[in-house]
Amino acid sequence: MTEPVTPQFRPLDPAALPAVEGRLALLVPPEGRLPAAARAVDRATRKALSRMLAAPAWAKLKPGEATVMAWPGGLAAEALIVVKAPRRPGPAEARAAGGAIAKHRGTGALTVAAGDAPLLEETVMALTLRAYDFAAHKTGEREAPGPVTILCADPEGAAARLEPFAAVAEGVFFARDLVSEPANVLTTTEFATRLEGLRDLGLEVEVLDEAALERIGMRLLLAVGQGSESPSRVVVMRWTGGGDEAPLALVGKGVCFDTGGISIKPASGMDDMTMDMAGAATVAGVMRTLARRKARANVVGLVGLVENMPSGRATRPGDVVRSLKGDTVEIINTDAEGRLVLADVLWHAQETYAPRAIVNLATLTGAIIVALGHENAGVFSNDDALADALVAAARAEGEGAWRMPMGDAYDAMLKSDVADMKNVGGRDGGSITAAQFLKRFIREGTPWCHIDIAGVAKVKAETALSPKGATGWGVMTLDRLVRDRFEG
């Protein structure tokens, strides 16, 4: 697994800053008196810092953005990273500052002269997450990243406040690694093997193979994977830290590669379908985090791992398949496969574990990207309290989430002439009809949220918390939801 940065915290001695090697980062307010660290650097550089701060380019920077001075005279550092940091930043601004530092950190040693900057843990958290670099398949010699040192007024306190985040960062990186892997490496069996490794952290892990899935009756899930040489799997991860409480169930779509099956996708962009297992990756990342921090909650994570391929054995458009629940589904479009996987796993989760609530995650529809772009995941729910708590958790963690509507009119669009339902409802309201399909597999009285993460699981432009690529969206949100709502 890609290892997160582990910063070291040290007392700040402004007089020692000119001798710092590698890269040096300063947090400088937009106006007013410079902090002690900046004044020391300004003296050492013969007012070069002051001249830079007086330039129009500095005025144009937004809070949390940075500029870089290369090989500054009077300093041993190879570069000076100057971040515009308000004296009283909000969490978003503090995180933006950390992300900006990580963006310019280079490969050598990095020292951040933070002093008594408020919300320092938010800044360092963002630095850690933004420094992610998936390099598992790059050859040749690579310079190992240098150490990160945070110089601050209260090193022990800052380190203590950041300690709980270490488990979250590990879960985020685990999820990002899974999403970043190519499909020829992260097959269904390899995915299951990696999840079995979580036993080392104290999780109970059970892998259900195709014979077990046949016995259970997960025919919808098996129908998705039957055209592939890669065998289908369901992996169940259990964390029991909450006594006798019924568990929260987290369910993830794990389509390790999605060609669309017989309803095959266009060639352009199909390479992105290595990320169609991001819902399962997020569930795995959350379970890793909960185990690492010894969460006082009962949580069961279930992921359906399949590959959707065309072949002589593949499911055809128009086939009718009976679900684990017993309802029959007319499969109009084999590229609407994720909801079939989730339907059986959702029903199995309820039959086997009687959860107090369910949250499922899936890169389910392109329609949610049309509706919300790449800024927000779509949240669908049958329970206002659970949905409100989830959206609040996402807001607190800086991960965009937006509640979407549901209703009987959308549900009626799933009517089939030959079966109990069909798996698509047409182009109109595509993300909503997909959610309505899943809702049919939720028992009355069970609080449930479906999160469509198709637009946020992997992005083509960097954010404050991640470089371009896999984001690990949802690990922080769901960990916060567990802490706020389900821990004793």
Image (spheres, rainbow, N blue to C red):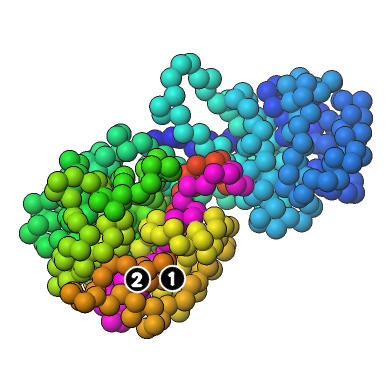
Amino acid of disc 2: Gly
Disc 2 + disc 1, Cβ < 8 Å: yes
| Residue 451 located left or right of residue 144 | left
Residue 439 part of the magenta-drawn span: yes
User: Residue 487 falls in which quadrant of the image?
Assistant: bottom left
Q: Residue at x 43, y 70 (%)?
A: 428
Query: If the image is split into quadrants, where does the C terminus sit?
Result: bottom left
Q: Which mark is residue 425?
A: 2
Q: Residue at x 89, y 41 (%)?
A: 56
Q: Residue at x 64, y 36 (%)?
A: 103
> How far apart in space, not on screen, are marks 2 and 1 (Cα)?
8 Å
Amino acid of disc 1: Asp
Q: Which mark is residue 428?
A: 1
Is 54 placed above or below 340 here?
above
What crowding class fits label 1: few (fewer than 14 Cα within 10 Å), some (14-19), or many (20 or more)? few
**What segment carries the magenta color?**
436-464
Give SS at disc 1.
Answer: loop
Farthest top residue? 141
Residue 60, horizontal then vertical, whole percent: 83, 46
What crowding class fits label 2: few (fewer than 14 Cα within 10 Å), some (14-19), or many (20 or more)? many
